[in-house]
Image (spheres, coloured by chain):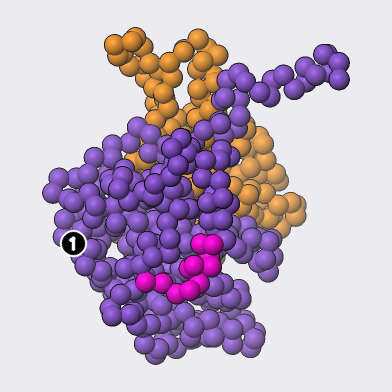
Chain colours: A purple, B orange
Amino acid sequence: MSDEHGSVFDGLLGGDSSQWAFGTDFEDPLAGVDTTTPDGVDPAELAAYCLMLGDDALIMSQRLSEWCSRAPDLEEDIALANMALDLLGQARLLLARAAAADPAVVPALPEGSPVPPEDALAFFRDDRDFRNVRLAEVPNGDFAHVVVRLLLFSTARLALLERLRTSRDHVLAAVAGKGVKEVAYHRDWAGRWFLTLAQGTEESHRRLLAALDALWPLQGELVAAHPLERSLAGAGVGVDPAELRQEVDAVLDQVLTVSGVPRPGRAPLAGVGGRTGRDGLHTEALSLLLAEMQVVARAHPSGRW
Amino acid sequence: MPMLTLADLGVLRGVEVERDADGEVVVASITPTYTGCPAMATMRDDLVHRLRDAGFDRVEVRVVLDPPWSSDWISERGRAALRAAGLSAPGPAPRRPGPVLLTLGPPRPAPPCPRCGSAATRLTSEFGATACKALYRCTACLEPFEHVKEI
């Protein structure tokens, strides 16, 4: 190749890294944000709490993104991808906040690894270290399944984020302030599709009831208070999920009543010795989900993307 | 939406010059439109690039998360640019004191068609090609169009 032709490639290597759309390095999502732990709060507890809220969003986002290219039509495909992206954004900030509060929660990586703390938490923790509710991790089913799961998940998350806006932790309050606007759209989408499927065809009605029956036992975990959540709620930083129960029930009853669907009677899925997703006790589905989600990052712990 | 500057979009929250022991630093503050907005890194890089090109060697970009971005922050010039590009500009953002109400019916009044001006438009999806846009279709001129969501 002659010199004059070779010059086409000259600009690709070296020079100012900011020529690349995403740079050659990661950016800190909390750059310039005050991440001091509020007075009287144990940084380890704050980090564990951020992992609970962040893991809910991350695992739910992963399940929603599995829908990509599989929805009944293009608009719903884009809708599911948008909701996955919103939750991924929330997860990124919450995991970064966990790492800033207590760096000890971040898994150790080889020296010189460029993986930022929030990615280390997402891709290098094992299933037992995840703190998400089990509702987020169960495998996808049909379209009725994703509608019901999103309705149950976003109803509880919206009620939680509404209250978290007044958290004494500025990062949590800011994530909640923005998240409320996003999750309100998710809940509306799920509520409308619930109504549509309930009053659609005999087949859509049947599938909706089957999804509701399968997922209802997992709903209780969203409004069951873990001791850590109660502790941080007491400190004015977190939200006690038990406080959400009334609002969550009212919204779900509204959707069920309008849709003409009776409230399911199935009992909540028990934990093991009282331990549930918040304690790191999961279904086998999480291990399989993580195996797929983490495989590339784990194969290249020093890789640059 | 390349027709908008970061200032028009309301993403650029401030540009200040700070002084430290080594001299002056230009500090630009930006806020994401949506939490998962994948364009944040590009916006940051564009800012650093433009400021360096303008002769400011020391540039720092900070993220501001609070208060959250609102479509009310899109400037008048930005709204005109959206309309000129065939997009529908957002109306006033909803104010939500207290619990957010569930909306099971068709959402808020549909925006007029940016192409023919007809009010006979229908929502196709509240989720568009980017997080900040919804998809509509005009039933008069039959063209689809994008509407920047009110948040």
A46 sits left or right of B33 in the view = left
Residue in the foreground of this view, choosing between B77 and A239: A239
Judging depth in this view, the residue of A251 and A86 nearest the camera is A86
Image side of residue A20 versus residue A221, left or right: right
- Residue at mark 1: chain: A
Relative image position of residue A98 (x, y in whole percent) = 33, 49
The answer to whether B49 is drawn above or below residue A301 in the figure is: above
State the residue at coordinates (55%, 76%): A145
Q: Quadrant of residue A18?
A: top right
Q: Is residue B123 left or right of residue B63?
A: right
Question: Which span of residues is magenta-colored?
Answer: A281-291
Spot the residue most to the left.
A40
Q: Name the spot of residue A180 as percent of width and height, x first.
A: 39, 55
Question: Can residue B91 be seen here?
Answer: no
In the image, residue B71 above or below residue A141: above
- Is the magenta region chiefly helix, strand or loop? helix
Q: Residue at x 68, y 61 (%)?
A: A69
A70 is higher (above) or lower (below) than A1: below
Whether residue A302 is in magenta: the answer is: no
**Percent x, y for residue A30?**
38, 38
Q: Which image quarter holds the N terminus of chain B?
A: top right
Label 1 crowd (10 A; few <14 / some 14-19 / many >=20) = some
Residue at figure coordinates x 67%, y 36% from the top left: B85
| Residue, far right | A1
Amino acid type for the residue under numbered disc 1? Ser
User: Which residue is depicted at the point 43% across and 15% down?
Assistant: B58
Q: Nearer the viewer, residue B77 or A267?
A: A267
Residue A62 drawn at (x, y percent) = 53, 60
Residue indicated by mark 1? A231
